[in-house]
Amino acid sequence: MTANPPRVRATFEGEPIEAEAGASVAAALITSDRVAWRTTRGGAQRGLFCGIGVCFDCLVEIDGESGQRACMIPLQEGMRVCDAGNAASERTEGPAA
Amino acid sequence: MTALRPTDQAPEFDVAIVGAGPAGLAAAGAAAATGARVVVVDSSEQPGGQFWRHRSEAAGVVDSGELHHGWRDYLELRRAFDEGVARGSIRYLPATSVWMAQHDSDKELNLFTLRLAPAHGGGSSEVPTVRAARLVLATGGYDRQLPVPGWQLPGVMAAGGIQAFGKQNGMLPGKRFVIAGTGPFLLSVAAGIVHQGGSVAAVLESSNLMGWLPRAHRAAGVPAKAFEGAEYTAAMLRHRIAYRPRTVITEILGEDHVTGVRTAKVRGDGSLVAGSERQIDGIDTVGLGWGFTPQMELPVQLGVGTRQDVDGSLIAIVDEDQRSTLSGLFIAGELTGVGGAALAVIEGRVAGRVAALEAIGATHAAFTALASAANGPTRAESRAIARQRSFANAMHLAHPVPQCWQHLLRDDTIVCRCEEVPASAILESRETMAGDDLRTQKGQNRAGMGWCQGRVCGFAVSCLSGGADPTPGAIETSLANSAVEVSLASPAVETSLAQSAKRPVAQPLPLGALAELD
């Protein structure tokens, strides 16, 4: 690996988080000692699971856009990341089968 | 949903390829080499797929390849790909999802239409639609999962997710790990963790590994695999990692995150050995992997012929040219049977080349069946495919999913993570409401209806509801190491798996994408 890529700074629920440039939002959350950042409808805590964009467990809200996968999205300078809360139940996809 | 009008527009591309992992990259390079106009759609930010997922190019981080296998092959494929993009013969659409694929066939002319959306974020795709004369699907796979008590705790991950996280971010998602499930991939994950400075308390392999003995000659046909195996073994010895065959996790422990696991020995018939229980504490991450599930949404949406592979996965049927049962549609990589990157590359190369020559031939009306036959796999390619496939089958048979997983479930064990559906609800649907497949289960208890659309729980719900006999007694008489063939190769389970892969849209998408339908 090359030496020290620049750091990117953003916030989660208003608190500062950061990661190496190119690292994911999830990487920044893990770096800040968070293992979970979403609350399910049943009240359980969730964080990373599949790590590759399949399971949607790691959902966060980013700059007001809900339902974003923290494992897939590179952290950008100044991103406002929030707990997706119950956003997981507000589907934006088509009709369910 | 709006009906899609067939279009008389000529396709802008000869070949469209979905996926830029090992199979997709190889297909793109081979197709572009024929002079065809190629488009590659991929959901990731950069090429490589899951196997060659790497540090961020956009951020200027150069990946040394030290966490990778076949990195030199990747660089070679990547060079051809980048040259194709630079020449303008490959149009590359990263961070883009295909949410619908459509096929129009008029005599010998095929037309594939792909509807695209951004892989993440809102808004609409810069290119909302692409049309092509031939389509190659190379969408790969993801870790197959089985529910176990406690697996919903934060800190429990897919084994492949831990590896992907490490490869992408140059860091680990935890400090001390237990890796469990079945298959040589678990060793690869453990070796990667110690390489990145983490520690591995144990690797728990449910199989007894004796299943390899009668099939050792198949591994011998693929020397690279033996070399990989030796590397992992060396890493395990060097770091004193406990490797425990015939062992499964019976429960994952922790209050608000993982702190430990309970384990037990498992017999060949899938039953647990009484008195063999142990506990491992002081860990913060568990990686689970039970083989892989091919990403079958698009093939199923297009209506291709499918079957169940020896590992129980639903896969697409292809011929030796990688043609599916649908005219003009080629399929390569894990979708034709989980077999790893080396096999995917060869299949991708054949698919890309044949698809491109066919497309060029079709548009120039000079195409003959003879030309088609001459463009198929070379003898060397055919032999390599056969060797790799034989190895993959040996691996699947030596690493069956053990029956005990169903007995470990408690009433309150979450099976569908998205909708938090417990095992009791699924078994109740099966017993009292004839919920014998995933579709019925969905209607009754919402299993498989959440964001992931059953991608994670589809296999487990299909097995639990679709007639896979949960009693160990029923399979005792069968060969212990081929339990998977007995328990999973059932028509009911196959039907349910096909339902699981059938999704109205292949990916969750922003509403803007629907508004743009022409």
Image: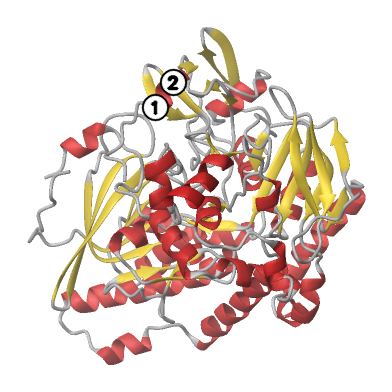
Residue lying farthest bottom?
Answer: B370
Question: What residue do we see at 56% from left, 47% from top?
Answer: B53
**Residue at 43%, 54% in the rendered image:** B434
Count the marks: 2
Residue under label 2, please give it: A86
Image mark 2: chain: A
Determine if residue B44 is in view.
yes
Mark 1 secondary-structure assignment: helix
Residue B49 visible in image: no
Three-letter residue code for mark 2: Asn
Name the secondary structure under disc 2: helix
> Which quarter of the picture shows residue A61?
top left
Which residue lies at the image location 40% right of the left edge and 72% below the top edge?
Answer: B351
Q: Is residue B108 left or right of residue A25?
A: left
Disc 2 vs disc 1: Cβ atoms closer than 8 Å? yes
Give the amino acid at mark 1.
Answer: Ser
Q: Classify B84 as above or below B454.
A: below
Q: Which mark is residue B230?
A: none
Counting from the top left corner in percent of width and height, residue B376 is at: 40, 83
Quarter of the image that includes the C terminus of chain B: top left
Gap between marks 2 and 1 measured at Cα: 6 Å
Q: How is the image coloured?
A: secondary structure
- Using the image, determine if residue B291 lies above or below residue B350: above
Residue B257 picture quarter: top right
Q: Position of residue A67 (x, y in %)?
A: 41, 27
Give the residue pinned by disc 1: A89
Q: Which residue shows up at 53% across the image and 30% down it?
A: A58
How far across and how far down the image is residue B67, in percent?
69, 48
